[in-house]
Amino acid sequence: MLILFHHFGMDVKERRVERLKQFVQDSGGAAKLARDFEGIDASYISQLINKHRPFGEKSARKIETLCRLPAYYFDRNEIRQDPAKYVVDELFQQMDEDTRRKWVAIGQTLVDIKDEKSTEDLEIKKPERAEPKTAMQ
């Protein structure tokens, strides 16, 4: 109960730090995040998490942009376990209806294929190797 009360009492900077911690953890750590997203500095991320630097508006928006997160991702109250799902949800909401239907159809086709055969049952054939041509003399 104390944790719940503390969460609701957080100011926006504390919330950003908590969400950044969760995002970094879900992403495999600060070093992996820096490798995966150009412009991200692992040591700067660690400084923000450890509160050696303030996590202000400008930093939050820049990290969201560099990590391809929705605007104000770090400011929001709800925490989702998988940031990738959150990003996909946001992108899906921005699609027009026709594009959404196409993506749903693709997803359903993939589910149907998986249901019909497991990957162990799929027969994968290697392409035949062509014999090298020799020069005529």
Image (tube, rainbow, N blue to C red):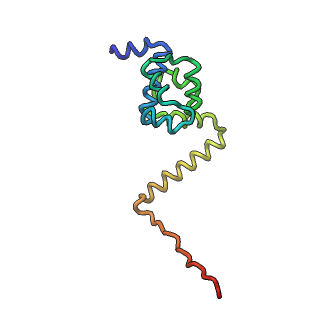
Q: In which quarter of the image is the N terminus?
A: top left
State the residue at coordinates (58%, 32%): 66
Q: Position of residue 21 (x, y in %)?
A: 43, 26
Q: Kindly indicate the quadrant of the structure image that contains residue 69.
A: top right
State the residue at coordinates (65%, 39%): 97
State the residue at coordinates (63%, 83%): 135
Tell me: residue 60, above or below residue 123. above
Tell me: residue 19, above or below residue 34. above
Q: In which quarter of the image is the C terminus?
A: bottom right
Q: Kindly indicate the quadrant of the structure image that contains residue 50.
A: top left
Q: Position of residue 54 (x, y in %)?
A: 50, 16
Tell me: residue 26, above or below residue 2. below
Residue, far front: 137
Q: Position of residue 41 (x, y in %)?
A: 51, 30
Q: Position of residue 76 (x, y in %)?
A: 51, 21
Q: Is 97 on the left or on the right of 67, as rendered?
A: right
Residue, far bottom: 137
State the residue at coordinates (56%, 28%): 64
Count of numbered badges drawn on the protein: 0
